[in-house]
Amino acid sequence: MTTGHGGKRSGAGRKKGSGAFGETTKVLRIPQSQIAAVKQWLENYKQQLSPEKGSETVLEHGENRERGLALYGHKVVAGFPSTADDFIEARLDLNEKLAPNRHSSFLLRVQGDSMRDAGIFDGDLLVIDRSLRPQNGKIVIAALDGELTVKRLAIRPQGTFLLPENPDYPEIPVSEENDMVIWGVVTACIHQF
């Protein structure tokens, strides 16, 4: 006896390629505690793919094609002027240049002037890579006793220090009593005029 329930019905369900990304989907099990993070990641990814005016990424026939900015094969002289040629050497994707380890990178905005002599100013955006190992001399983002700071890491025989790049600020010694977690290594500073 056939009840007409269950099974695949012709024409039922979502049409192939009709989802937000224009491609077929696959069921995936993820931990329930991570649902919000995965949804947010997908939303951010979708926004990167949207063909909005001025976007660096466009969708063309269902494929993701990065355009990037023109990188000219001539250096600009900071001293006396020289003639520039019109030869475009390549297209430069700023995401690849500033954050090659995209999935382990994030941005933070600077507040204050303790790193001004390193070229990091109040309001600048820092690109931080969590996958890089913090080493002596690198500029890092550290959570020291619960407060975030950007400083140069110094590992000396006397101990570990967080160094400002402004003589108006003191060095910060890190002792065993301090709770310090290094969030990542600063790889670039975006300074706008």
Image (cartoon, rainbow, N blue to C red):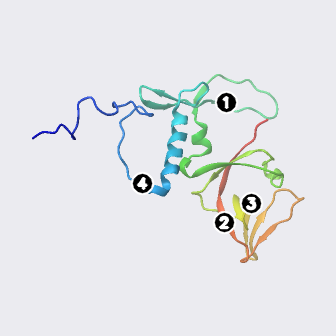
Dot 3 or dot 1, earlier in sequence: 1
* On screen, residue 159 above or below 66: below
Q: Nearer the viewer, mark 2 or mark 3?
A: 2
Q: Residue 3: give x, y in percent of width and height.
A: 16, 39
Between 46 and 78, the residue placed more toward the observer is 46
Label 3 Cα crowd, 10 Å radius (few <14 / some 14-19 / many 20+): many
Determine the CA span between mark 3 and mark 1.
Answer: 33 Å
Q: Which mark is residue 30?
A: 4
Label 4 Cα crowd, 10 Å radius (few <14 / some 14-19 / many 20+): few
Q: Residue 82: give x, y in percent of width and height.
A: 76, 26
Q: Amino acid at mark 3?
A: Arg
Query: Which residue is pictured at 69% across the width and 58% down the height?
Result: 140
Q: Amino acid at mark 1?
A: His
Which residue carries the number 1 mark?
A: 74
Q: Residue 131: give x, y in percent of width and height.
A: 57, 57
Mark 2 in CB contact with mark 4 (< 8 angstroms): no
Dot 2 or dot 1, earlier in sequence: 1
Could you say which quadrant of the image residue 165 lies in? Answer: bottom right
Determine the CA span between mark 2 and mark 3.
Answer: 14 Å
Q: Residue furthest left?
A: 1
Q: Amino acid at mark 4?
A: Ile
Q: Is 86 on the left or on the right of 46, as rendered?
A: right
Which residue carries the number 3 mark?
A: 152
For mark 4, give the secondary structure: loop
For mark 1, give the secondary structure: loop
One can see residue 117 in this view = yes
Q: Nearer the viewer, mark 3 or mark 4?
A: 4
